Image: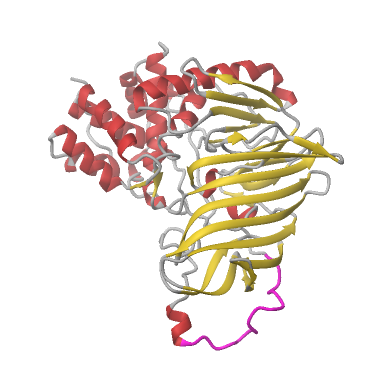
Amino acid sequence: MRGRQVVSMLAAGLTVACSASNSATEGGAPPAKDAPPAGTPVTRAAAATAGTTGIGDPYFPGDGNGGYDVGHYSLTLAYEPKSKHLSGTAAIDAKAVQDLSQFNLDLHGFTVSSVNVNGAPARFQRKGDELTVFTNLKDKAAFKVAVAYAGTPDPVRESPNLGSYGFIPTADGSFVTSEPNGAKTWFPGNDHPADKATFDFRLTVPAGVTAIANGELAGAPQTKDGKTTFVWRETNPMTTYLATMTTGKFAVRTGVSKSGIPVYAATDPRFNGILNNLYEQSSKITDYWATVFGPYPFKSTGGVVDDYAAGYALENQTKPIYGGFEPDPGIIAHELAHQWFGNSLSIRRWRDLWLNEGFATYAEWLWSEHSGHGTAQQSFNDAYAGATDEIWKYPPGETRPNDLFNASVYVRGGMTLHALRLAIGDADFFALIKKWAADNRYGNVTTDQFIALAEKISGKQLDGLFDAWLFKPAKPSKPSAG
């Protein structure tokens, strides 16, 4: 992600994202009629087999859920831009990881009309952003839950610096960017990056409106009775916050990059003059990153520029989205680097966010070097000289839950990688980056794993370097450029 907060780093001119609120505004439908009455005693056996209401991330204790792993989401949704009404069904394929008397899904707002488990009606109730489903599942059992719901999406609002995120209604459709925990504003699920899944989207909108989601179109859109249905499929695992249902009036260009990767670029009419540039830059940069980071992990690439003035960009899987501005090549390079670092390799806990944003920031410096606009060393020097005291007081190796997108996570994270490159040399550094991407393709990663791999490849003990750059609230000594 690249966000509103612009920190002047002298000649570096770096734009960094900023903090987001920890949770959406309280809301939701009343408990279902068939839910257990309020105050119903919970037996000890039932409590022991209830899935937890959080996935176990202390930074966001209410996000995600325990007791099961999601394998696939099938979202069949219809959206009316004029009334801002979203309705449909989320079908979720999952597997229990314990005996389950009940489990939770994250969902903010909406009226839930029914919940089925394995085709049979299930009791359920609502409390805040938790949808509790009562069931009887054995450990390791595969199951399908289908939730029918409808209402007006309510995005997370007035989060520091990010403003609004999640499903944001716009004049002609919707702008959907869900990091860190806004997926629950438009579909029920396990809303935390630790539980990745594949997705199908069957999206119906008024004729003349385009519906854009992740992955690739499964055939041509079909129009009937004034409605058009778009079917998208993302067959590679994806975190919930990277899913999108961006809709509106768009000009679209498709094709393939020079290396043969399918490309999908779309712009709101206000930005139609940059459609070709968005397409070409996205193609060229994706191809280049494949030579630096290893094979592109997904089946298509591209980008979307919408007219909603978000002031930030988000690396939605296969289709980064830019909110109300023309992205320069550096920002495109940042978001496309995330397709490897953040999307294919996803963090297990939010404390390790620098593994996403530090890597994408360093990718900007590498792109600048590749395109002849200043070396990575020059970008590092500018960042080091221009960094504020606040960056040095904020160790990026343990991000703060109320300030996830601090400049330190981006800029000091990027500087960490350059300091590592200087310490172990280019050959080992770029071998490390490729192996990191290859070994953890489609998985979840931690900082400890990265440090261990860096030490294994370089044959050096690197605790001091990572401690100084990631974990100490002090300005590290500037490393020698060699």
Q: Is 194 displayed left or right of 2 in the figure? A: left
In this view, the residue in front, 209 or 202, is 202
**Residue lying farthest to the top in this orientation:** 372
Question: Looking at the picture, how far across and down is residue 218, in whole percent?
Answer: 63, 36
- 234 in the magenta segment: no
Q: What range is drawn magenta here?
A: 28-43
Quarter of the figure with the C terminus: top left
Q: Is 283 displayed left or right of 471 in the figure? A: right
Question: Looking at the picture, how far across and down is residue 464, in whole percent?
Answer: 17, 41
Q: Residue at x 59, y 63 (%)?
A: 145
Q: Is residue 390 above or below residue 125?
A: above
Q: Residue at x 25, y 32 (%)?
A: 432
The quarter of the picture where residue 275 lies is top right
Q: Is residue 129 above or below residue 100?
A: above
The scheme the figure's colours follow is: secondary structure
The quarter of the picture where residue 148 lies is bottom right
Q: Is residue 109 above or below residue 240?
A: below
In this view, the residue in front, 312 or 219, is 219
The chief SS type of the magenta part is loop
Is residue 471 visible in this depiction of the protein?
no
Callout count: 0
Is residue 317 visible in this depiction of the protein?
yes
Question: Looking at the picture, how far across and down is residue 124, in whole percent?
Answer: 63, 73
In this view, the residue in front, 96 or 362, is 96
The quarter of the picture where residue 117 lies is bottom right
Question: Looking at the picture, how far across and down is residue 109, in whole percent?
Answer: 68, 61
In this view, the residue in front, 75 or 480, is 75
